[in-house]
Amino acid sequence: MSNETDKSVSLDEKFALFDDHWSPKVIAQCNGQLVKLAKGKGELIWHKHDNEDELFFVHKGRLTLKFRDREIVLNPGELFVVPRGVEHCPLAEEETEILLFEPAGTAHTGEHNTEQTVASEDQPWI
């Protein structure tokens, strides 16, 4: 675990370290919450987090958060909090850089375990 407290974190530098999609990387921790980065392209899966809210912030690109009754489109500099228990499906038509803020131990794809799922213990610090 690399939680350096004596220097700032450059999102551009951190995003440059990886190319895989929908595979969160941890960059900071704050009061039991993890700050994660992910690149998205295409669709993740429909899922929900029964006990945790999930914050999505778009750094670059455009993210559509699909819900069963509507869609929310996030552009660079915009964020949205998906409330706990709400089923959602992230979609990025072009490669999109996303910052996530969620409690440590939050399951990547909720109760679903698919080839896209990255276990919490397999989400590296970068």
Image (spheres, helix red, strand yellow):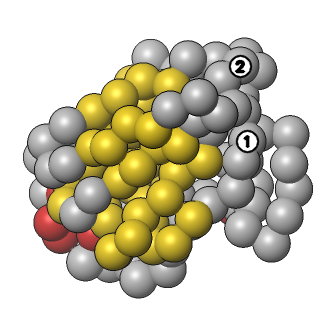
User: Given the current orientation, which residue lies at the most extreme front position?
Assistant: 69
Q: Along the horizontal axis of the image, is 71 left or right of 61?
A: right
Residue drawn at (39%, 79%) of the image? 18
- Which amino acid type is marked by label 2? Gly
Q: Position of residue 59 (x, y in %)?
A: 20, 53
Q: Position of residue 25 (x, y in %)?
A: 48, 59
From where the camera sits, is residue 102 visible? no
Q: Along the horizontal axis of the image, is 53 left or right of 64?
A: right
Q: Say what secondary structure mark 2 lies in.
A: loop
> Distance between the Cα atoms at labels 2 and 1?
9 Å
| Residue 79, placed above or below residue 43 | above
Residue drawn at (20%, 37%) of the image? 78
Residue drawn at (49%, 58%) of the image? 91
Q: Which residue is mark 2?
A: 85
Q: Along the horizontal axis of the image, is 115 left or right of 54?
A: right
Which one is nearer the viewer's eye here, 104 or 81?
Answer: 81
| Residue 112, placed above or below residue 115 | above
Q: Which residue is mark 1?
A: 47
Residue drawn at (49%, 80%) of the image? 20
Q: Position of residue 27 (x, y in %)?
A: 37, 50
- Which amino acid type is marked by label 1? His
Q: Say what secondary structure mark 1 lies in.
A: loop
Query: Is the C terminus in the top left, top right, bottom left or bottom right quadrant?
Result: bottom left
Residue 117, image quadrant: bottom right
Q: In this figure, what is the number of numbered marks?
A: 2
Q: Sequence-wise, which precedes: disc 2 or disc 1? A: 1
Residue 62, image quadrant: bottom left
